[in-house]
Amino acid sequence: MEIVAEGLAFPEGPVVMADGSVIVVELAGGRITRCWNGRSEVVCEIGGGPNGAAIGPDGALYVCNNGGLDTAKFQNANGPGAEGRIERVDLATGKFERLFDACDGIKLEAPNDLVFDADGRLWFTDLGKSYDGIRTASGLFTCLPDGSTIAAIDRHPVSYNGIGLSPDGTTIYCADTHQARLYRYDRKVVAQRGTWVATAPGPVGFDSLAVTAAGNVCVATLFDGGITTITPDGQTRKRDFDDRYTTNIAFGGADMQDAWITLAASGLLVKVRWDEPGLKLHFNG
């Protein structure tokens, strides 16, 4: 295991760039950071709680921002400035702008992770929030990156987190944190309910995910830290990592068998070899 960067403030959302660098969000630091060869630089101080990131069709970085944390109360932040939102970051300048913070007049709570399909449409999850004993709604949404339209696909999940596309582009996968379950949806802009794929064994939770070229879903697994690989027919296997908050995985390299993993409790971005190639994402160069 190679340590790519350390001292990160709860890293998440690794994005493997064409130049070999990796961009991560620092959820507890409110910033976007580029990492390479043991070095790091801040792309922007975006504020709130950046939770997931992806390169869009225009080459910009799109970010799910959960609005931030109230560390004094050990809960999600609430009130002005803590709105959940989708943001766009110009990587050349670090300038960022808010695209969406509501859908159909209902505010977004805590957007968590996102993926672009081949048509350039953005799909994202909203984990929901917990504060003052209140648990708000989770959901699956889709929007266009020009800020023109947004739609709710499912407002009934418990706690959706990771999201990814099947290799043929027809299926959306969503990981539910508190249930440690994986669900699938048709990639259609219509209201629908998820179909259960698998549940992880043991006292664990699910975080973000990446899909392999063969169609297996690799889900970052919390509490008993690791990566749980789930086949399309629901079989599971797990690779352990020594971090309670193993939060995300992304693939890259010449053969797509290099895996970058965020170990959030340790503040690390690490690189390991994987046993199968990952699926190349749209628009990553």
Image (cartoon, helix red, strand yellow):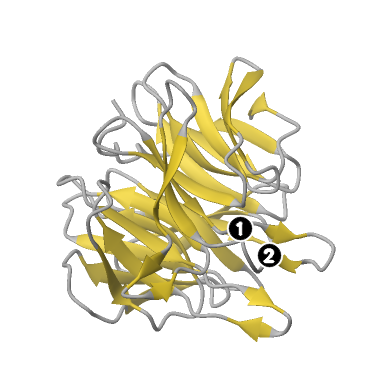
Q: Which of marks 1 and 2 is in front?
A: 1
Mark 1 and mark 2 residues within 8 Å of each other at the beta carbon: yes
Write the residue at 53% across / 72% down.
128
Task: Give me the residue at 26% from left, 70% from top.
Answer: 185
- Bin the neighbour count of mark 1 within 10 Å (Cα to Cα): few under 14, some 14-19, many 20 and up: few
Name the foreground residue: 107 vs 11: 107
Quick one: 58 or 277, which is closer to the camera? Answer: 58
Residue 283 appears in which quarter of the rendering? top left
Does 197 appear above or below 261? below
Residue 219 appears at what percent x and percent y?
48, 56
Of 139 and 233, the residue lying toward us:
139
Q: Which amino acid type is marked by label 1? A: Gly
Q: How far apart are marks 1 and 2 (CA)?
A: 9 Å
Which residue lies under the disc numbered 2? 77
Residue type at mark 2: give it: Ala
Asked where in the image residue 101 lies, by quadrant, the reply is bottom left
Residue 228 visible from this viewpoint: no
What residue sits right under mark 1 in the picture? 81
Q: Which image quarter is the N terminus in?
A: top right
Q: Which residue is located at x 58 percent, y 24 percent?
A: 35
Secondary structure type for disc 2: loop
Whether 157 is drawn above or below 275: the answer is: below
Q: Is residue 280 above or below residue 5?
A: below
Left or right: 36, with 243 as reference point:
left
SS of the residue under disc 1: loop
Check residue 22 in the rendering and tell me which mark sits there, or answer none.
none
Q: Label 2: few (<14), some or many (≥20) within 10 Å?
A: many
Name the quadrant of the C terminus: top left
User: In the figure, residue 187 lies in which quadrant?
Assistant: bottom left
Residue 209 percent location from the top left of the image:
45, 53
Where residue 105 sits in the image (x, y, percent)?
36, 75
Q: Report the residue that reaches farthest toward the front.
A: 80
